Image (cartoon, rainbow, N blue to C red):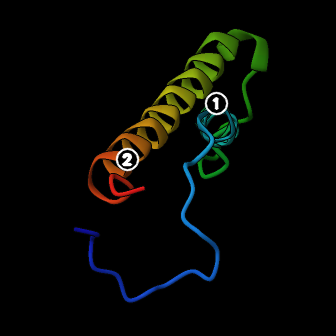
Amino acid sequence: MPLPSFYRSQDAARPWHVAYAALCGAGIGLVAGLLKTFNPFRPAPAENLTNHLVDVALAALGFAVLCAAAAALRNFIARRLVWHDR
């Protein structure tokens, strides 16, 4: 039984690309890490990026893993509940 939705795509439903989701997540994590490092909302001068390079890399990795896991979970659920009749 498909999940109810008000939006119906003209294209056939297809799985999400986990690698693409990881790449997008890494980009989001990179931006989040840089915003935390160079906090533009405080009056203090910006710190050196090399001091916080590990924090920025871990934020990018964390978001990449999170987005890849979300895409994989979506594909798993869709295969079990929506696409099982194909």
- The residue closer to the viewer here, 60 or 48, is 60
Give the mark nearer the N terminus: 2 vs 1: 1
Q: Position of residue 19 (x, y in %)?
A: 66, 32
At horizontal 65% and vertical 15% (from top left) the residue drawn is 52
Residue 66 seen by the camera: yes
Q: Which residue is mark 2?
A: 79
Q: Quadrant of the C terminus?
A: bottom left
Instruction: Using the image, determine if residue 75 lies above or below residue 81.
Output: above
Q: Which residue is mark 1?
A: 37
Q: Secondary structure at mark 2?
A: helix
Circle 2: residue type: Arg
Say if 9 sits above or below 24 in the image.
Answer: below
Other residues around mark 2 within 10 Å, as few (<14) / some (14–19) / many (≥20):
some
The residue positioned 77% from the left and 19% from the top of the image is 48
Q: Secondary structure at mark 1?
A: helix
Badge nearest the viewer, 2 or 1:
2
